[in-house]
Image (spheres, rainbow, N blue to C red):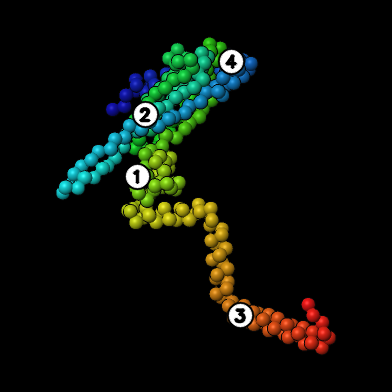
Amino acid sequence: MIDYKRILLILLCTFVVGITSVTAASSCSTSTKKQLAQNAAHVKVEYEIKDFSEEKTIEVDGVETTYKVPNYIFEITVYNVTEDLTVYIQKSNSEKQITVNFENTTDGTYTFTDNNFGEIYNYNVYVRSNADECRGVTLRTTKFTKPRYNAYSEFTYCQNSSNYYCQRFIKSEISIKDTDDFLNKIEVNNDKNDPNKDDKENKEALGKLFKENWKTYLLIFVVVLAAGTGAVFFIRNYQKKSGWKL
């Protein structure tokens, strides 16, 4: 059964919010909005990854094996929140949001944590006016991507590698079927990012060219050799006849 009362209430709330936003926008002077926009432009959100991973050892058939238990926390910080601004931060996969006012910051800085290191998702950031004249007006909208932990980064093959598949934290999903597929992707990716790739390709191209045209090159070599031999013979005969010496 359709709940008409609930639908009517939702429509009424939407209408009231819309009227409030329009009123705020219309009463917000250009000079005030410009100043607010300047303040909003300085708001930034950054994150730092804290490593709380542990190493544990197990013994199997008398042989000890050390393994890593990953545990990372993302420490997310909002900077430069002023008294006339309110910052709303919301996960792209959640309806919950964090509201940051100047009152709950430390000198304009607010920090919270996210301990989900197994998923990639965005944080949407909305900077709105908290000034009476322009209250609720959206001044800036931005987002940032929270990466996820990549277990493949712990492979021995990834030591000292800058390959994307070997990065500890990644911002886009990777599709890997098995270990062989992983090793193949590393090799392919490394080839694409090899700083000496052009030199290798040039050498391969020259080798291929020589292989395909070796008869022509051999003929040229013989002709040059014969011409050089003839020139030497001619010069020696000329020296004997004229008595000229080098």
Name the front one of labels 1 and 4: 1
Answer few, some or many: residues within 10 Å of disc 4's Cα (few below 14, many 20 plus, some between 14 and 19): some
Image marks 2 and 1: residues in contact by CB distance under 8 Å: no
Residue at position x 45%, y 15% in the image: 106
Q: Amino acid at mark 3?
A: Leu
Q: Is residue 87 left or right of residue 7?
A: right
* Among the 4 quarters of the image, the one containing residue 88: top left
Q: Amino acid at mark 4?
A: Cys
Residue at position x 61%, y 19% in the image: 34
Residue at position x 37%, y 42% in the image: 150
Alpha carbon of mark 3 to alpha carbon of mark 2: how far?
Answer: 70 Å
* SS label for mark 4: loop
In the rendered image, the vertical position of residue 93 relative to residue 150, given as above or below: above
Q: Amino acid at mark 2?
A: Asp
Mark 2 = which residue?
114
Mark 1 = which residue?
154
Name the front one of labels 1 and 3: 3
Answer few, some or many: residues within 10 Å of disc 1's Cα (few below 14, many 20 plus, some between 14 and 19): some
**x and y percentages locating residue 18 in the rendered image:** 49, 20
Mark 4 = which residue?
28
Q: Is residue 60 left or right of residue 136?
A: left
Viewer-proximal residue among 96 and 107: 107
Alpha carbon of mark 3 to alpha carbon of mark 4: how far?
Answer: 85 Å
* SS label for mark 2: strand
Mark 3 = which residue?
218
